[in-house]
């Protein structure tokens, strides 16, 4: 139960000098006779205010009904429970008098019959008829607004609210419960029109930024071309594959292409440890399997650090982090197993530390990256061999190894895998 009802002591009263004149003037608006009443409080708590030339505060709380104790007559309408006192009393009332509750208290009725002046601290009360009123007022209130759907009344602030899906995002709309419904609908639609215009402008600016990043003279891409030419060539092919797939499934082709350009920039830190940049000895041949796995899997985190340093958009950063998900590097895992002499090897030590794909573009880049790397390593990459590989990629028995399970977990649509064969056609046009 509320702390107010556990204590009977009253808060400290304001000094008599501060109370006298103001209290008499305020009390003159109420009948002198006190009465015991039961009241039903509304959804809003006590609100207090004080004029600049006053010493005491005035607090008020909305009531939905009240009745004299032991009387069958219930008063309904717009009533207020009011109090006059110092700041200590106001804080006490704001914090401790419950909303949506039945209270019993001593009051004086205002001369205009709309307010009840508290003369003591309230305590819990009960009446079956008032309880029915209380339960009724707690029920959800819904209003249908033409063209916008259903709005629910938020009683604590007195407004009708609804969340609609706008441009793929949830948008909160609200208006005063007493406003004209048609006018509210027109106002909300006008706001949406402004948001649409703003969204189109933002999309245009984002597209311009992506086009700027896709320029081969972009500093990071120039570094990739010079310092890791094999990775650069790989990124160009992955970008072509990703763009084609994005166009087929309704994703953002420009974002998929640009994200693919940058997805492997983390390899700039140790380019010779990645096969596409090797032209002779492979340093992994003389490196511990655990160290090799750590070097390879760190290129997503290294890429994110570079992307942040160069202020690449968050969408590009997401693709960099997610294009391997949390898949394991199986080659080094098996190498560690062979060297373990029967000792346990934890596959967690060989997993990427990135997030699983959360967007279509991230998932597309993941698949295109897997396909390009696998096809590049084929001894005889004929169209038939490539198609068989892509078909195996979608099969359940190879999903965990090649990362397709990552797509399923990120709720990617089946259309992504259905279009894998069409990526083959795109690959063939590049060779």
Image (tube, grey):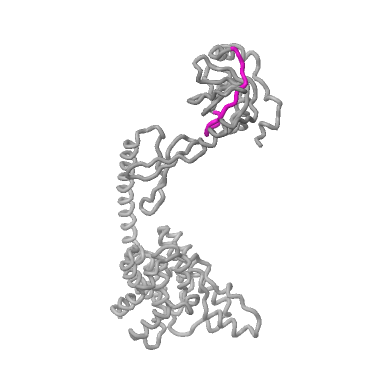
What x and y, as percent, mark residue 169? 40, 52
Left or right: 366 with respect to 246? right
Does 36 appear in magenta?
Answer: yes
Residue 272 visible: no
Does 277 appear in magenta?
Answer: no
Q: Going by the picture, which residue comes out furthest to the front?
A: 72
The C terminus sits in image quarter: bottom left
The N terminus sits in image quarter: top right
Which residue is depicted at the point 44% across and 78% down?
A: 395
Task: Specify the quadrant of the image occupied by residue 292.
Answer: bottom right
Left or right: 116 with respect to 275? right
Residue 75 visible: yes
Left or right: 228 with respect to 292? left
Which residue is depicted at the point 41% across and 34% down?
A: 177
In the figure, 140 relative to 53: above or below?
Answer: below
Region in magenta: 32-46
What x and y, as percent, mark residue 243? 33, 68
What x and y, as percent, mark residue 85? 60, 21
Q: Going by the picture, which residue comes out furthest to the bottom?
A: 380
Left or right: 29 with respect to 242? right
Task: Specify the quadrant of the image occupied by residue 38.
Answer: top right
């Amino acid at each position: 139960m509320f702390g107010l009802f556990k204590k009977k002591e009253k808060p400290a009263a304001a000094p008599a000098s501060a109370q006298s004149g103001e209290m008499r003037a305020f009390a003159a608006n109420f009948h002198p006779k006190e009465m015991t009443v039961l009241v039903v409080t509304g959804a809003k708590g006590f609100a207090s205010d004080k004029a600049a030339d006053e010493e005491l505060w005035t607090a008020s709380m909305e009531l939905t009904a009240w009745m004299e104790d032991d009387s069958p007559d219930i008063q309904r309408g717009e009533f207020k429970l009011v109090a006059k006192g110092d700041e200590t009393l106001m804080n006490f009332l704001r914090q401790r008098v419950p909303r949506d509750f039945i209270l019993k208290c001593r009051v004086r009725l205002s001369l205009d019959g709309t307010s009840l002046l508290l003369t003591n601290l309230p305590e819990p009360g009960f009446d079956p008829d008032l309880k029915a009123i209380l339960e009724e007022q707690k029920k959800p209130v819904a209003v249908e607004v033409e063209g916008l759907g259903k709005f629910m009344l938020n009683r604590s602030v007195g407004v009708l609210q609804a969340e609609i899906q706008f441009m793929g995002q949830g948008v909160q709309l609200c208006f005063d419960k007493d406003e004209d419904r048609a006018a509210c609908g027109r106002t909300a639609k006008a706001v949406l029109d402004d948001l649409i215009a703003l969204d189109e402008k933002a999309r245009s600016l984002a597209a311009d930024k992506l086009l700027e990043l896709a320029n081969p003279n972009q500093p990071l891409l120039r570094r990739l071309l010079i310092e890791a030419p094999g990775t650069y060539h790989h990124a160009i092919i992955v970008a072509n594959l990703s763009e084609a797939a994005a166009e087929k499934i309704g994703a953002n082709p420009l974002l998929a292409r640009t994200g693919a350009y940058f997805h492997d920039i983390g390899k700039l830190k140790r380019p010779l440890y990645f096969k596409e940049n090797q032209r002779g000895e492979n340093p992994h041949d003389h490196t511990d399997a655990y160290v090799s796995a750590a070097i390879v899997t760190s290129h997503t985190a290294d890429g994110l650090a570079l992307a942040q340093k160069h202020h690449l958009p968050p969408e590009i950063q997401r693709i960099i982090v997610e294009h391997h998900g949390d898949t394991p590097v199986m080659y080094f895992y098996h190498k560690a197993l062979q060297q373990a002499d029967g000792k346990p090897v934890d596959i967690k030590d060989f997993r990427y530390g990135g997030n699983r794909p959360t967007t279509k573009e991230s998932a597309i880049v993941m698949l295109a990256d897997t396909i390009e790397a696998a096809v590049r390593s084929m001894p005889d990459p004929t169209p038939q061999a490539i198609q068989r590989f892509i078909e195996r990629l979608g099969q359940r028995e190879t999903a965990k190894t090649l990362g397709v399970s990552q797509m399923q977990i990120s709720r990617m649509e089946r259309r992504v895998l259905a279009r894998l064969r069409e990526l083959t056609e795109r690959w063939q046009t590049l060779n």
